[in-house]
Image: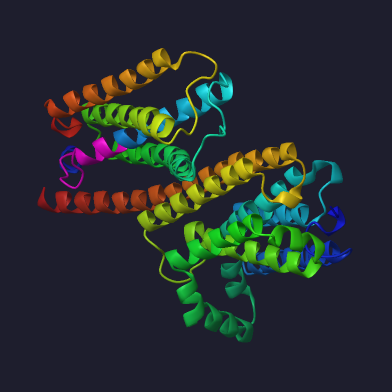
Amino acid sequence: MNHSGEVGGGPGSGFWILNLLLIAAAGYAVGVLRLSARGVHWPVTRSVCAAAGLCCMAIAVLPPPPATGFSGHVVGHLLMAMLAPMLLALSAPITLALRTTPAKVRRVLLSVLHSQLSRSAMTAPVVLVLNVSGAYVYYLTPLYDIAHRQPWVQGVAHLHMFLAGCLFSWFLIGRDPLTKRPPVRTRLIVLLLAAASHDFLAKTLYAQQLPAAAGTPDEIQMGAQIMYYGGTTIEILFAILVMTSWYQRSGRQLARERRQRLRTATQVG
Amino acid sequence: MMAVERSSRSAPSVGTGRSITAGVLMGVGVAAFIDETVFHQLLHWHHFYDKSTAEIGLVSDGFFHAGGWLAMVVGLFLFADLQRRRATVPRRVWAGGLIGWGGFQLYDGLIQHKVFGLHQIRYEVDLTVYDLAWNISGAVGLIAGVVLLAGRARPVSAR
């Protein structure tokens, strides 16, 4: 098994992705600086999330130490397809771009965001199918083996998993004003279905010793358990984030109602 | 200010239903949590997977593992919201909690362990005692919850 082509493709592909990540980080920093020059406050937590998300991506695209085998691959998968997209969604990069780029760029960005394609991508069935199918096809078909021989296949597969993870994250917890926000109930159902599919996939890998090309049965069982418990941990974070935003929003609603009642009470009294 | 307090307490928007829902979710969450930490991780009685498991068992396990922690998170947030609104009905929360815990325990013990054969409570021992203890405790919880639910309960706001 050739570990140098573990992620991305061929020697040096990790290098290019690292450069892209650095450019993204620089772009984000420039945006925050422009805002602060205008005296606009940009929450520090968002910048921290952006930095952490990009770091996760950097770790994921670097080839894992050869000794870690399938476990190293699974950790990379969890970082790239779940944790990095979650952190990036929290960093609200689209909002930042809309507020700091020139009008021309902004117009293009908005027309993309408001296009029929991105509207229909942000629906529960599409989010679920894209997110779940990628991992199933990758791990349960010979694709895993092919991807480890053909760097470009690996690159496409990882790009798909990352983008599907981003769609999933933005759907659940995105801070950007994309389209109409899905109701909390829909978001929780999507999370439940995705998490159950993830558990099922991990246990299937464990039970059937798949992907066959991933190494010895022990290595596969270790990797499958990391996938199971690691995935659960990140999904619990997702659930907490969804419910936190619900709690805050209903808190504001409650405060409004109380103010209103106070007003009517003082008027009557 | 007193008038405001009173009117917000008697707000009809939050009934006892929410207390039951929060209780059931937390009960399911606690059962799943005990199952995972005590029996899987600490005692190592349960196995991650045993070779006799069928496909349907894995699907069921996936939903119950994911549903367990999701129920815990959502239940806790619903409970926090009830507390914030001063609308908790403790008796209903307990009723829901016992029903959720007992129901999960029974489902796990009867359907997942026996029908789907996902894994057993413990290995290399006579299972009868363990199965009885597991399922009777679940049934007792479920019945206690239903009894509590049938009893009268006044919302906190009415006191």
Residue in the image at 51% along x and 51% along y: A197
- Would you say residue A76 is visible in this rendering? yes
Q: Is residue B129 left or right of residue B150?
A: right
Residue at point 17% right, 44% down?
A: B11
- Residue A63 lies left or right of residue A252; in this view the side is right
**Residue A92 in view here:** no
Residue at the limit of the structure toward the right, as seen here: A11
How many numbered circles are shown? 0
Residue at the far bottom: name it: A104
State the scheme by which the image is colored: rainbow
Tell me the magenta residue range. B9-22
In the rendered image, residue A256, in percent from the top left (x then y), is placed at: 29, 54
Q: A117 or A98, which is in the foreground?
A: A117
Quadrant hosting residue A181: bottom left
Q: B130 or A69, which is in the foreground?
A: B130
B7 up-or-down from B40: above or below: below
Q: Position of residue B12 (x, y in %)?
A: 15, 45
Which residue is pictured at 68% across the width and 52% down the height? A77
* Frontmost residue, A120 versus A200: A200
Name the spot of residue A122 as percent of width and height, x first: 47, 69
Left or right: residue B153 compared with residue A223: left
Q: Is residue B19 magenta?
A: yes
Residue A68 quadrant? top right
Q: From this view, report whether residue B101 is shown above or below residue B25.
A: above
Which residue does the image show at 57% across and 42% down from the upper left?
A203
Residue A125 included in the magenta stretch of the image: no
